[in-house]
Amino acid sequence: MGIVDEDIERIRTTVSIVDVVQGYVALRRVGQNWMGLCPFHAEKSSSFSVREQTGRYHCFGCNAAGDVFKFVQEIEHTDFVGSVEHLAGKAGIQLRYTSGGESRERQRRKQLVDTMAKAVDWYHQRLLTAPDAREAREYLRRRGLAGDVARTFRLGWAPDDWDVMSRELGVASDLLRETGLAFTNKTGRLQDSFRGRVLFPIFTDSGDPVAFGGRILPGSSDPAKYKNSPETAVYAKSRTLYGLNWAKADIVAQNQVIVCEGYTDVIGFHRSGIKRAVATCGTALTEQHVQIMKRFASRVVLAFDADAAGQGAAERFYEWEQKYQVQVLVAQFPAGQDPGELSVSDPEALAKAVDGALPFLAFRLQRVMSGRPVRSPEEKARLAEQSMAVVNEHPNADVRKLYAGQVAVHTGLSVADLTRVAEQRNRKPTVRVTPVRQYGAAENAEFVAVALLMQRWDDIAPWLTEHLFASDTNRRAFLALAQTNGSVEASIEAADPDAREVLERAAVADVEANPEVEAFNLIAAAVRRELSRRLKLTDAAAIREDSEARQQLDQLQAGDAPQRAAEWLLGWLHRRNEERGRDR
Ligand SMILES: [Zn+2]
């Protein structure tokens, strides 16, 4: 069997290869060509080139090349006929076959998808109009999932009945069974798989319905809160991401994909105007999921309780980061709230959480370091060892050294010592305490800066901005001082209780330090933090800017013309923070 040549040529001439490739890869115009990151090999700079006039693509990195059919074959893992049918489907071209028609497998797949499409419609209409769906409609309204949202996401209602869908759908029973919509029960009769549930239809990234996720209503006696379609010929959980069909365009445009835990989280993000969220369908994130996401974006933001993802997942995440050249970040939400709830109660918090997402390693490090006292030398050493154990899980030595610097700043230990620990990755980290700064109590650099502000305002104030403070409490203490022009009493009055505690201690601290040196230490630490958030840049201009920042940082630390470097770096930090504000 085959497809009539004329139809193949019609596709070749009517379909734009640039449009097709852009469904998978973000392209920008360079002269006659369109360039982007190659979807067939991992790379950081664009070497994948597409030309409309010749209808061909070519990668200078891995030498992948071909026409539009070859591209679809490679990226969709299909054969030639499959690629022609795929493109014909998108272009709305009816194909004629030379003999035998479509392959049986393909035909069957189409029947299964058609059956699912009918079921999606049937359940959706049921939700919108049936009297028995009133409770479901009210539940969805309370969760912000009614009206347009229900229509956009084609939500449905499976009535609390044995077989009403199977009877009314008008589809052969073997198709109902093969799609998992129904099954044969003990009495030998066909029974609906979903009953008394709100249904979230699940589509492939090209928009074919392949499964349902079903949720009970509150107060239901059914013990299973969620129930999903079984795996079928058209549905594999480990290769399916809920919401990808709606999110694809924004994921490519933003080079970022947000991964949630549940269907309502995805919808919550979309409602809040963040249309690049997807969810796994009742499974953990798999390598195949990452492979799919990599086709569209290089930044993956996890929007679920990453406590659960902690230690065990770290190794896999780092491996995927290297293998697929993606960066895994973690968004943090106000305690106990999921994105679905937040989209109703505080949509802005959603954007903020995504915006402030931390690299996975930074996130884990923060968990180890935050809220831990570091007063005695022993406490410092212990905290540094635990922190470095987390840092040393990372396979890349440059990354480990960067974070070793952060641990040093946080604990007040020597950067050189901790960098050495980061170099000897396979050994259990042991940290000797060799204090590097000569101030009285074992306090960290941020605290010293606050204390110096109280005592020698004119010398240090010009060098400090709020972005230099990694600790939120210290930052608020700084702001209270800044707002009151360094007045000890007024700032203590104005501060919140935690910041006040810092200010009260700083007011009596015995600090012997050079204000400029301390300020430059803070600037260096903030620059290192900022650089570590941006480990996997792909934009050429941003890469250049970051490398300039690294040079200035070296200059600052080497001590030649540190003032000029400090000024430049403060400007850079300011721009970075502004940009982050704008991205929101
Ligand atoms: Zn390539």
Image (cartoon, rainbow, N blue to C red):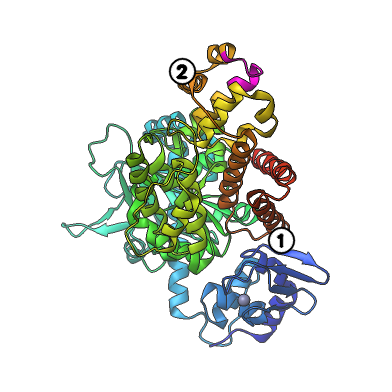
Position of residue 35 relative to residue 520, above or below, is below
Checking the image for residue 540, the label placed there is: 1
Say whether residue 377 is left or right of residue 51.
left
Reading the image, the residue beneath label 2 is 497
Of labels 1 and 2, earlier in sequence is 2
Q: Which quarter holds ligand 1?
A: bottom right
Position of residue 78 relative to residue 313, above or below, is below
Position of residue 371 relative to residue 34, above or below, is above
Q: Which residues are magenta?
A: 480-488
Is label 2 within 8 A of ligand 1 (CB to nearest ligand atom)? no
How many other residues sit within 10 Å of disc 1, few (<14), some (14-19) or many (≥20)? few
Amino acid type, label 2? Pro
The question of residue 484 being in magenta is answered with yes
Pick the residue in front: 499 or 208: 499
Q: Residue at x 72, y 73 (%)?
A: 50
Q: Residue at x 30, y 52 (%)?
A: 192
The image quarter containing residue 252 is bottom right
Position of the C terminus by quadrant? top right
Pick the residue in front: 201 or 374: 374
Kindly state the secondary structure of the residue where label 1 is placed.
helix
Is label 1 within 8 A of ligand 1 (CB to nearest ligand atom)? no
Amino acid type, label 1? Ala
Kindly state the secondary structure of the residue where label 2 is placed.
helix
The question of residue 486 being in magenta is answered with yes
How many other residues sit within 10 Å of disc 2, few (<14), some (14-19) or many (≥20)? few
Say whether residue 463 is left or right of residue 449.
right
The image quarter containing residue 2 is bottom right
Pick the residue in front: 221 or 181: 221
